[in-house]
Amino acid sequence: MNYLTTFIQGTLLLAASLVLYMAMGCSGLGLADESAGSYVDGDVDMDADGDTDGDTDGDSDSDSTIIEDPEEWDTDTEADPCDTVNEVVLYLSADDSNSMASPVEARAVILSGAKYMNAVRTYEFLNYYTFDNAPALAGAVAVTAQMTPNAEVGEGDETYDFQISVQAPALSNAARRPVNLTLSLDTSGSMGGHPIEMVRQSCLAIAGSLKEGDIVSAVTWSTVQSVLLNSHSVVGPDDATLVSICNGITATGGTNLNVGLATAYSLAEANFSENRINRVVLMSDGGANVGVTDKDLIAQHAYDANGEGIYLIGVGMGGLGYFNDVLMDTITDEGKGAYIFIDTAAEAQLMFGSRFVSNIEVAARDVQVEMTLPATFEMIEFHGEEYSENPDEVDPQHLAPNDAMIYHQIIGSCDSSVVDHTDPVIITATYYNPISLTPLSTTLNTSMATLLAADNALILKGNAIVAYAEALKKLKTLIGPDATGLIDVVIVKVQIAQAASPGDPDLAEVLNLLQTYRTVF
């Protein structure tokens, strides 16, 4: 799809949005819009830099930093002049590439016919849905980018959707390192029924992905904890001992998360090996309060100055409205591992079958992206986790094999009259080898002209995924025509992406979910 075709599609989409805007009598219906100068993530009101401190300097610790008034970025005042000389350098961070609970929770809500929605983290949607980038060479990462005009945000003709991908190498299950896996299984009373069945299904899916020589331990916890397996060396996939343990899991009693985690880490430490992937897999509905001790315990084991530590994989499961997403997100962030949500047996097979390697392995540690844009360009929206002009203010994150970090944003020029599309656009990903900790980097040196002339199918898909996630945040507070109108605008974006990527299963799923959710309103 070329530049002209995309521009025409964007213009048509803008016209549709304006018609809807007039019908609704709103101050603006851009998909990046929220109440003036703020946005909503979950139920927490945050300012433009993603926190609650009132400081809107453009730095972000949120998945969706939004500067929605063009006057905030298209300025030429004495206090904030438009810099027409110096290149713009920003440092970006996505969340760990295998943190992706939010879109599965959202899908479960929509398919249930309910409206209740946990926190929607846009970057997790970009992690969950796949982008067809070529894998990197072994031991390295690949950096690619796509750009397309944006007709919805800002003024003039120099506003663009811009998407960066940092792609990991491919790795098969047969070629991965052996694992030292410790299952920490919540069997408290609140896990009864569907949640405990999801624990069984997840446990069985893990059993199917293990290979001879892998070590697995398991502890269940409620009011008390029980060690079901200790340092068991599996004979291969579907090890009979482990399968029997999985099938026998039941729910009863109270909740003691702290003791359950402490016991799991003790088992993991006893079998720790620098030649293995050392992971604690916590399966829970999060029905407990995480304390300082728990967070310190998790963080203490997640990092080893001489190599990899014991990372925590958080697996959420629970009934709608009863699952503690905040707690699970908090402790898995401390544990530097995957955060996923299991609502069906099929999802368990996806996460611990075809995505088993990417959910337990690490291809690159402490990935951080440095982005250099031509003079006059500024960040209007960022749909990752953090960005700043200061690299020390952006926390690096880990990249899994068979996976990619997607950095989706909208950029715009504060003085379109001086924009030169041949000026360089430079993207550098810095990272460390996960075993040796050798510092490495990969650089893409391109230009806006080159990006605009290239294929844009993946960024159109990114636009659709971001629009879907951002709309879910707003739909918590909209009813009737306001809600259905917003959904219709997002559906158009999905259909534009489908035209560029015919048969894409992710886009088909998102379209179906939007059409289903529309009936709720």
Image (spheres, grey):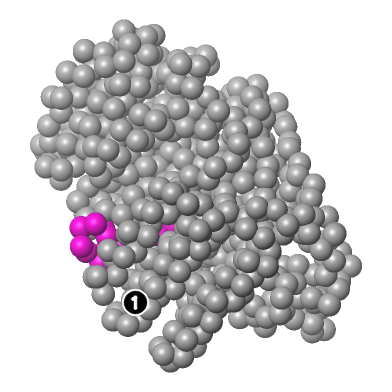
Q: Is residue 312 visible?
A: no
Residue 165 picture location, percent across and down? 62, 46
Image height check: is 273 above or below 13? above
Residue 127 picture location, percent across and down? 48, 47
In-image side of 502 versus 89 (left or right): left
Residue at 29% x, 36% y is 348
Check disc 1 and give the amino acid type.
Answer: Ala
Residue 307 picture location, percent across and down? 59, 24
Taking depth in this image into account, of 376 and 48 the one nearest to the observer is: 376
Q: Residues within 10 Å of mark 1 (few under 14, many from 20)?
A: many
Which residue is tagged 1?
483
Q: Quadrant of residue 373?
A: bottom right
Image height check: is 107 above or below 17? above
* Quarter placement of the N terminus: bottom right
Q: Residue furthest right?
A: 85
* Residue 334 belongs to magenta span: no
Residue at 45% x, 36% y is 337
* Quarter placement of the C terminus: bottom left
In-image side of 288 versus 372 (left or right): left
Start-end of magenta stretch = 109-124
Taking depth in this image into account, of 329 and 227 the one nearest to the observer is: 329
Determine the secondary structure under disc 1.
helix
